[in-house]
Image: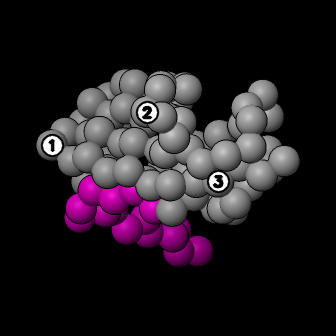
Amino acid sequence: IDKPVEILPIKYSLEYPYPNPFNPTTLISFSIPKKSQTSLKIYDITGNLISTLLNQPMNVGHHQIEWNGENLSSGTYFIRINSGEFSDVKKVVLVK
């Protein structure tokens, strides 16, 4: 029996959350090509920090984190990743 081979990422990436719009949870997927200190934070439309989902060293690979917006108001939020020298932002909409 062949064991499936995991393909490791060659570049950093932050995918668009799915589903989007969401209620009340969405999956955030990202890839890390080398072990890096990584933070994943949620901001509201005015730039206020809402939540820190992740702030730790992450191993090489493809990762997913579920974000639950159950206690938040409907609206637009921004997901920001910082890992190594990589930084990216994606928009997500919470609809209740």
Q: Position of residue 29 (x, y in %)?
A: 51, 55
In the figure, is residue 58 to the left or right of 21? left
Q: Residue 35: percent from the left, percent from the top? A: 25, 39
44 lies above or below 51: below
Is 10 covered by the magenta stretch?
yes
Mark found first going from the N terminus, 2 or 1: 2
**Residue furthest left as drawn:** 85
From the image, tell me which residue sits under label 2.
47
Kindly report the distance in space between the C-alpha atoms of the residues bearing marks 2 and 3.
15 Å
User: Where's residue 6, x and y in %?
Assistant: 43, 65
Report if residue 41 is visible in the image. Answer: no
At which x and y percent is residue 57? 32, 28
SS class, disc 1? loop
Callout 3 crowding tier (Cα within 10 Å): few <14, some 14–19, many ≥20: some
Taken as a whole, is the magenta stretch helix, strand or loop?
loop
Residue nearest the viewer, comparing 54 with 69: 69
Foreground mark, 2 or 3? 2
Q: Is residue 63 above or below residue 7?
A: above
Q: Which residue is mark 1?
A: 85
Query: Which residue carries the number 3 mark?
Result: 93
Type of amino acid under label 2: Gly
Using residue 80 as the reference point, say whether residue 69 is left or right of it. Answer: right
1 left or right, relative to 95 = left
Q: Is residue 17 visible?
A: yes
Query: Which region is colored magenta?
Result: 1-15
The quadrant holding residue 1 is: bottom right
Left or right: residue 43 versus residue 58 is right
Q: Residue at x 51, y 41 (%)?
A: 45
How far is mark 2 from mark 1, CA to CA? 21 Å
